[in-house]
Image (tube, rainbow, N blue to C red):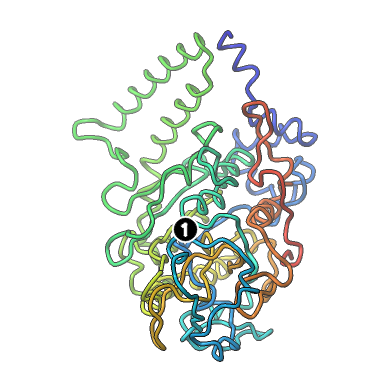
Amino acid sequence: MNPLREYELVETRRHFFSRSATGIGTAALASLMNPNLFAEQQKQKAVEAGLHFAPKAKRVIYLFMSGAPSQLDTWDYKPKMKDWYDKDLPDSVRNGQRITTMTSGQKRFPIAPSIFKFNQHGEHGAWVSEILPHTAGVIDDLAVIKTINTEAINHDPAITYIQTGSQLPGRPSAGAWLSYGLGSMNENLPAFVVLHSTVNGGFGGQALYARLWGSGFLSTKHQGVSLRSVGDPVLYLSNPKGMSAKMRRRMLDGLAKLNKDRFDEVGDPEIQSRIAQYEMAYRMQTSVPDLTDISDESQATLDMYGPEVTKPGTFAANCLLARRLAERDVRFTQVFIRQWDQHGNLPKDIRRQCGIVDQPSAALIKDLKQRGMFDDTLVIWGGEFGRTIYCQGGLTMTNYGRDHHPRCYTKWMAGAGIQGGVVYGETDDFSYNVQKDPVHIHDLNATILHCLGIDHERLTYRHQGRDFRLTDVHGSPVQGILA
């Protein structure tokens, strides 16, 4: 097939907008020509501009706890389990559900109650573990969902699933879908930025692959840009010695001409993406240093995020950076932190992890509120699955481990479009099965899109003969947490 004809048949973002709702192609074009103007008018003019419905959120900050925090030791209070210490998990509770190979060989599955105290907080008395005191202080701003569930039982397929809507690699990530569907609100920064948090100076834990913030079969211009914590935030962002900004501009102009000639010859749309990415990199040479320079932050703000906020790459520093990205209207910011994979020595390790994330997470909520950004920023916190009530390995009164558990776990959402002070869903006494109001990860992603004014069934991209979407073939927004 002639490449130019092939390009004409490719589903483009503009085609999606023009077909999915009347007039939305005009809105998309306006966002490219004048993103700041579009950003200011988006919420008020959404219906007229052609979004599926009026959005509550303009942007998303996703705090991802890679490795799967134990819901039993943080959010899902199960006081009856104290009487079950070291008793076997009843077969009627497990009911033949599959388990990982890490515990499938155990002769028994002894119950390990949480050693942590839980207390009620907020206007509605939500139960929160003692190891999350700062987050407990903002509980009335959160919607805590206890019944998130997934089919994936191991880390890589599970995190790929929740990030892309499929356990198999190759699909666009959530941030890429939003970049594709809504475009950018800041011409000097990417629509989708990824921050990786260190723990005790390193990363550790389960590996995170670039496909988790990749664009899949969408144009590569929609993939997440990962900022580094050491050296230049983006590799090769600074000009090498001997090259001035003027020389860089001349080089890019010459390169753009060569790429345009090649595009006219073969019609490959990725050439256009490459031109756009070179131009974005040029603009980022100015915008990124300003973004990462926190010298203009007040001491009160720094103190709110905690003592590690001035150490680049820490979770505290990344939460502050996420707020600065939100101020600059970056559409989707993902903050990863690893080392939640606690198969053994869980009490010590989860106390450490919560000590790292608790204060900055709460500070982010407070900071957004005091700057008037909470009402149009959606914040999400949680991992890829939960943890079992039964112990992995040796069990004592003060120490235990927990295996992977996909059937029910806890995440929270806050901000734009979300009711504060809500605890949604119920699990059984063992935090093993959902008893009321299940929320599949497709439902979670549908809810995120809903808050941004998108009907998840209509944000699609035709690839290999079928229409793909972030929520695959099912999912519904969780009405019980929507404002």
Front-lying residue, 114 or 55: 114
Quarter holding the C terminus?
bottom right
Q: Is residue 454 left or right of residue 414?
A: right
Residue 278 appears at what percent x and percent y? Answer: 41, 30
Residue drawn at the location 49% of the way across and 8% of the way down: 265
Q: Looking at the picture, does residue 43 appear above or below residue 35? A: below
Instruction: Give the farthest residue toward the left.
Output: 241
Question: Can residue 244 be seen?
Answer: yes
Front-lying residue, 59 or 443: 443
Q: Secondary structure at mark 1?
A: helix
Q: Callout 1, which amino acid?
A: Ala
Residue drawn at the location 50% of the way across and 41% of the way down: 169
Q: Is residue 298 left or right of residue 465?
A: left
Instruction: Give the farthest residue toward the front.
Output: 107
Q: Looking at the picture, does residue 186 appear above or below residue 60? A: above
Q: Is residue 316 left or right of residue 144?
A: left
Q: Looking at the picture, does residue 94 appear above or below residue 158? A: below
Residue 9 lies in what quarter of the image?
Answer: top right
Quarter holding the N terminus?
top right
Residue 469 appears at what percent x and percent y? Answer: 66, 40
Using a 10 Å C-alpha cutoff, classify the residue at mark 1 as few (fewer than 14 neighbours), some (14 to 19) or many (20 or more): many
Q: Which residue is mark 1?
A: 322
Residue drawn at the location 42% of the way across and 16% of the way down: 257
Question: Can residue 299 be seen?
Answer: no
Residue drawn at the location 39% of the way across and 87% of the way down: 398
Query: What is the total number of numbered labels drawn onto the structure image?
Result: 1
Front-lying residue, 413 or 362: 413
Q: Looking at the picture, does residue 372 appear above or below residue 226? A: below
Front-lying residue, 117 or 311: 117
Residue 355 appears at what percent x and percent y? Answer: 40, 76
Residue 418 lies in what quarter of the image?
Answer: bottom right
